Image (cartoon, rainbow, N blue to C red):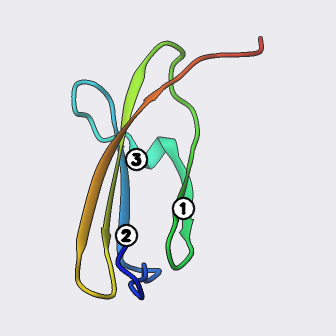
Amino acid sequence: LLTGDTIPSASYEAKIFDAAGHDLSATMIAGSSNTDTIVYVWIQAGTSGMVYFLRIRITTTFGEIIEDDLAILIREVFK
């Protein structure tokens, strides 16, 4: 973010997709929140060994649009 720019609470969107492009946000995003400079997204569920893609789109108070995709590999650690 530019100096003095912030992330208003209602100006970001988070979605999660599988490799085929299916939107799984309703079942995999457990919640989200933000501070002036950080967006937090809580992910739940998923299948071990699968890769999912989290897309975050932010519109800042200066009107800048920031969009990024993050790959998330699910691994079951404890059985």
Under circle 3, the secondary element is helix
Under circle 2, the secondary element is strand
Q: Counting residues from the N terminus, which is met first, the one under dot 2 or under dot 1?
A: 2
* In this rendering, position of residue 19 left or right of residue 14: left
- The answer to the question of whether label 2 and label 1 lie on touching residues, with beta carbons closer than 8 A, is yes
Residue furthest front in the image: 3
Callout in the foreground (2, 3): 2
Q: Within 10 angstroms of label 1, few (less than 14), some, or many (20 or more) residues?
A: few
Give the image quarter of residue 20: top left
Residue 25: mark: 3
Of residues 50 and 45, the one drawn nearer to the viewer in this rendering: 50
Name the residue carrying label 1: 32
Name the residue carrying label 2: 12
Quadrant placement of the C terminus = top right
Q: Is residue 15 above or below residue 52?
A: below
Quadrant placement of the N terminus = bottom left
User: Who's the residue at 40% across and 23% down the image?
Assistant: 51
Give the image quarter of residue 13: bottom left
Under circle 1, the secondary element is strand
Question: Which kind of residue does numbered mark 1 sit on?
Answer: Ser
Q: Counting residues from the N terminus, which is met first, the one under dot 3 or under dot 1?
A: 3
Callout in the foreground (3, 1): 1
